[in-house]
Structures are given as C-alpha cells and as structure tokens.
Image (cartoon, helix red, strand yellow):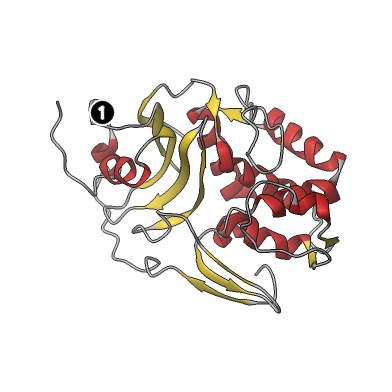
Amino acid sequence: MLGTGFFFLASSDTYAVPTPSNPYALYEDRAELPVSATAWGLYDARTNKLLSGHNTEAVLPIASITKLFTAYAVAATDSYDETVIINWHDLETHGRAGRFAHGDTFTLRELLFPLLLESSNDAGEAIARILGNRFAARVAQVADDISLDATTIADASGLSNNNVSSVADVASFVQHMHDAYPYVLDITRLSLYVGEDNGWRNNSPLYTSIGYQGGKHGFTSAAGRTFVGIFHMPDGAEVVLVLLGSSDLVRDARVLLGEEVVSVP
C-alpha cells in the first residue's frame, strides 16, 4: 500500500464475471462506430493484441497521460521516501490542482496522489525537479525496453505539446506499468485519498466505470481529450482502451466498451 493516509475505492470494484469462450469477440471490428477520437484502440490486456482501432500508429500529443510516465519514473527509481519541499517554481506551473502552498513538504510517495488523482501539474514539476536526470533516464529506459518508438516525453506534466505517443505505444506502456508497478495504477482507482494535512479527489470522468482497473485522462487544446484505461468487463474480457484527440471522452469510451448502443452510419 502506498502512503499512510486513508483512501477510498470506487464503487465499481465488485461485479459478477461470466467467462464465455471468447469474450473478446464483442470488442473486435468496431472501426465503423461513430467515435470522435482522432485515434483509438482496444487491446486484449493479457496479450496486447489489437482487437479494434483507428490510426493506432499516429503520433499525437497525449496531455496528462504523461503523468503515468512521471509516476513510473518514481517507482522505477524506488525513490518514494525522498523529501520534496514545494517552491515558487513548482507553483508557477499552469493550474492549481493539488492546492499546494510554498513550503509544503511531502515525500515523492505522497505526491503521486495529487499527481494521479487531481492531475496536478505542480506535483509533476516538483517530482521532475527532485528526480533530476533520473526522470529522463527512467523514461528513456522503459521506452527502449518495450520499444516505444513513437513516444517522446518532454516534461513531467503533459503541458508540453512535445509530449507525444501513439495509441499502440500508450497501450503497451500501461500494460507494462500494470505488470511492473500495479500499485501505481491502483492509486488511479481511488475515489479519495486523505493524507495527514491534505486530501485529493479523483477527477477522472471514467474511474467509476464498471471494472475500471486504473488509467489516466488528460486535456490540452493541442491534444484534445485523451485517455488510457484497463477494464475488467462483466463479460470476462480484460481490455485496454486508448483514446487520443477525443472531443467527447465519456461517450467514446461508452461506445467502444459496449455500454452505449449506437447505430453505424
């Protein structure tokens, strides 16, 4: 368990799971569905096989999906207990998510909660500052290890338009994260985390979806709305969903996961 505070899981953590002979058949050949995302993909979470998708190799901005790479760098350096004192440089980062004040003191472990639950850019900047060269080194290492050839991470928050990847790379990365550091993704399933002096709520529009096993959403004007998530579906399938350049994240996800029935044009 990360941290010493109190945390609350979403209500979607228990459900019946039937096991049909081929649960993934329901998620194949969905390319004709009306989806707003510029690029998207559905993958078998156990094998990384592409089930259905569109523009899965296109290189696009990923916005705050970047923060999963930032969390990965913390986990990969095993630096959870390093102390972080929030400074003015951190607070100058765009946005106020996390609601930090100058002089606030955290460990890197504690900063993972505002980073991933409230998508705090200040937390990302502070983490990158403390990790220094280790941040870029760990991101470069995982990109090399699992062949993320379309991925460039320019900053720790996702604010830069130079944070780019492809649907295929993002799916590969989140599956690797799930295998290597599942407890980091567990943070993204929490509805709330309450620390000693702070509390942060999950602001993802999809974390209460049935079977949600973790992920991250994001938004910038250049990237549009972005999302990656792992889902254990009630029909027995375990899928990774990636959306890049969406204008309606929730509806796209519901359509592709089969939660909203639509007619094909």
Q: Quarter of the image containing the N terminus?
A: bottom right
Q: Is residue 106 above or below residue 65?
A: below
Labels in figure, total = 1
156 or 140: which is nearer to us? Answer: 156
In-image side of 124 versus 104 (left or right): left
Q: Is residue 259 above or below residue 55?
A: below
2 or 203: which is nearer to us? Answer: 203
| Residue 210: image location, x then y, percent | 33, 59
Report the residue marked by disc 1: 29
Residue at the spot x=41%, y=21% of the render? Answer: 55
- Say if residue 141 shows up in the picture: yes
Q: Is residue 140 above or below residue 134?
A: above
Tag 1, which secondary structure?
Answer: loop
Residue at the spot x=45%, y=43% of the render? Answer: 45
| Residue 196: image location, x then y, percent | 70, 79
- Say if residue 47 shows up in the picture: no
| Residue 191: image location, x then y, percent | 48, 68
Q: Quadrant of residue 257?
A: top left
- Circle 1: residue type: Asp
| Residue 223: image location, x then y, percent | 51, 32
In-image side of 241 versus 176 (left or right): left
Q: Is residue 76 above or below residue 59?
A: below
158 or 208: which is nearer to us? Answer: 158
Residue at the spot x=61%, y=60% of the render? Answer: 183
Q: Quarter of the image containing the C terminus?
A: top left
